[in-house]
């Protein structure tokens, strides 16, 4: 008779402590605990700011020249006429096949 009450009280206290611990651990994980982790988070933030435009991050003139050369080579190799964006996946259009409605009996 006493055991169900004990289990109910125990379950309530355990769930409260787990909820409190999860809330506290979230705050602890959000802030960096050591200088290396803080530096890593700062670098990730910098990278995110730089790569937001969809372009290369810190490109040098040599890298940009190499990218243009590779894109033009790909365009020549696969039939790009210079007007198409060779970095996009091609779109395919398949015409609907004509089906003859005549049946032979």
Image (cartoon, grey):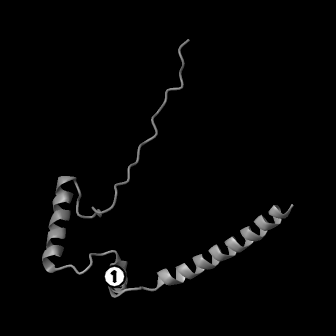
Residue 75's x, y, as percent? 21, 59
Q: Toward which corner of the image does residue 46 lie, by quadrant?
A: bottom left
Give x and y (percent) for residue 11: 72, 68
Q: Residues within 10 Å of mark 1 (few under 14, many from 20)?
A: few
Instruction: Residue at 43%, 42% (x, y): give it.
Output: 95
Residue 60, quarter of the rendered image: bottom left
- The residue at which mark 1 appears reads as 40
Looking at the image, residue 58 lies above or below residue 77? below
Between 21 and 60, the residue placed more toward the observer is 21
In the picture, measured across the screen, residue 20 lies left or right of residue 10, that is left
| Residue situated in front as seen by the camera: 45 or 37 | 37
Taking the image as shown, residue 83 lies to the left or right of residue 18, namely left
- Please tell me which residue is depicted at 73% across the width and 69% down the height of the picture: 10
**Residue 23 at what x, y percent from top left?**
59, 79
Q: What residue is shown at x 30% (from left), y 75% (from top)? A: 55
59 relative position to 94: left or right: left
Extreme right residue here?
Answer: 1
Q: Would residue 61 appear left or right of 13 to someone viewing this image?
A: left
Callout 1: SS: helix
Q: Is residue 102 above or below residue 63?
A: above
Name, please, the residue furthest toward the left.
62
Q: Position of residue 50 (x, y in %)?
A: 32, 82
Residue at 81% across / 62% down in the picture?
Answer: 4
Q: Along the line of sight, which residue is nearer the eye, 31 or 79?
A: 31
The residue furthest front is 2
* The N terminus, quarter of image: bottom right
């Amino acid at each position: 008779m006493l055991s169900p009450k004990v289990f109910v009280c125990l379950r309530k206290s355990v769930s409260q402590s787990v909820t409190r611990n999860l809330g506290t651990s979230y705050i602890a994980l959000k802030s960096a605990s050591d200088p290396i982790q803080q530096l890593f988070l700062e670098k990730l933030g910098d990278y995110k700011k730089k790569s937001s435009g969809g372009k290369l991050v810190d490109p040098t003139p040599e890298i940009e020249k190499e990218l243009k050369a590779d894109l033009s080579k790909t365009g020549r190799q696969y039939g790009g006429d210079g007007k198409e964006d060779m970095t996009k996946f091609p779109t395919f259009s398949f015409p609907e096949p004509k089906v003859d409605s005549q049946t032979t009996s």
